[in-house]
């Protein structure tokens, strides 16, 4: 998703690739992934991006 967002003029502040999830909503069920994504989001909130 980073490249399409960058082509629209957005700045991608953090990249976190998640592989192996094919079913809709399946990432939500993976606690470690969700924790990491939450932490990244919280960090971006404080960075001013």
Image: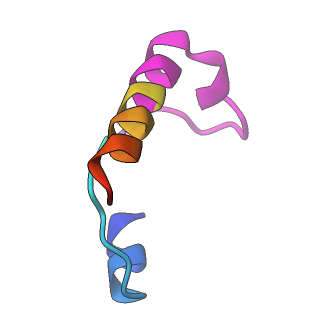
Is residue 30 visible in the rendered image? The answer is yes
Residue 44 horizontal/vertical position (percent):
35, 45
Question: Does the magenta-highlighted stretch encompass residue 43?
Answer: no
The image quadrant of residue 31 is top right
User: Is 31 drawn above or below residue 45 in the view shown?
Assistant: above
In the rendered view of the protein, which quadrant contains the N terminus? bottom left
Magenta stretch: give its range: 18-37
**Is 12 displayed left or right of 21 in the figure?**
left
Q: Residue at x 52, y 23 (%)?
A: 34
At 30% from the left and 71% from the top, the residue drawn is 11
Q: Position of residue 35 (x, y in %)?
A: 47, 18
Q: Quadrant of the C terminus?
A: bottom left
36 lies left or right of 34? left
Q: Quadrant of residue 39?
A: top left
Q: Position of residue 15 (x, y in %)?
A: 28, 49
Residue situated furthest top in the rendering? 31
Q: In the picture provided, is 11 more to the left or to the right than 8?
A: left
Residue 33 is inside the magenta segment: yes
């Amino acid at each position: 998703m980073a490249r399409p967002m960058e082509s629209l003029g957005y700045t991608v502040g953090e990249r976190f690739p998640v592989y192996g999830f094919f079913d809709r909503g399946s990432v939500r069920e993976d606690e470690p992934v969700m924790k990491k994504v939450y932490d990244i989001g919280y960090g971006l909130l404080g960075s001013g991006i």
